Image (cartoon, helix red, strand yellow):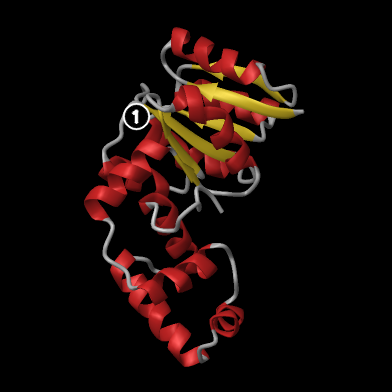
Amino acid sequence: MIRIVLVDDHAIVREGFKLLISREADLDVVGECERPSEALRLVAGLQPHLVVVDLNLPEGGGFALIPKLHTELPEARLLVLSMHDNPGIVSKAMECGVHGYITKAAAANELIPGIRAVLGGSVFVSSDIRVARQRHRAPPLSAREREVLELLATGTPAKAAAGQLGISDKTLYFHRSNLMQKLDARNDIDLRRRAVELGLVEGLQNF
């Protein structure tokens, strides 16, 4: 059974999320609270597999809580469930190390898929965020860059990707360098995250 802790300062919101989760036989909300200090006590005692965190919390908010959760329970997956869809806020949350971000507007349809993606080791952002980012921020990519990005974003090693595309390693690394510059990525993990956030690879909702 997958153990989940919910951290949200509105009891009625927690009840709604619990109802959605309770329909899944293998998912169990083992704890819930509204304050970060309570959350830290809960995760220490319950050792959940997943912590679902709102950003609008007392005691400094969700952004202050996230690094503490990483320290307290480094193996747990962290999923933000927030009313905020501002790209800057989403990016900040992802940079803090959360494994997924779902808006409350999309939660009815995407909470369970998001939970499963995150638990499976993937990064997940809700569809409304992906659409908005693709419309407003996605840079133009050449057909070859899209092919390279799709392979790298799904975890294909660079040399293997070059072989599949029939290009030299040097050419592959040239395209990879261009992609990192265009997507403002610092490494391969960052590149995969940006591909998810921007919806640049067709069908790549998570990885």
Q: Quadrant of the C terminus?
A: bottom right
Query: Where residue 40 appears, x then y in whole percent?
Result: 55, 28
Q: Residue at x 51, y 88 (%)?
A: 167
| Residue 23 falls in image quadrant | top right
Report which residue position mark 1 lands on.
60
Query: Where residue 145 appears, x then y in whole percent?
Result: 39, 73
- State whether residue 70 is above or below residue 186: above
Which of these two is toward me, 140 or 104? Answer: 140
Position of 32 with respect to 139 (left or right) is right
- State whether residue 56 is above or below residue 117: above
At numbered mark 1, what does the secondary structure look like: helix, strand or loop?
Answer: loop
Position of 184 with respect to 101 (left or right) is left
**Which residue sits furthest right?**
1
Position of 78 with respect to 197 (left or right) is right
- State whether residue 188 is above or below residue 102: below
The amino acid at mark 1 is Gly
Query: Where residue 112 appears, x then y in whole percent?
Result: 58, 29
Q: Quadrant of the N terminus?
A: top right
Q: Residue at x 59, y 66 (%)?
A: 155
**Which residue sits furthest top?**
12
Q: Residues within 10 Å of mark 1 (few under 14, many from 20)?
A: few
Q: Residue at x 69, y 32 (%)?
A: 47
Which of these two is toward me, 83 or 131? Answer: 131
Query: Where residue 162 appears, x then y in whole percent?
Result: 54, 83
- State whether residue 77 is above or below residue 109: below
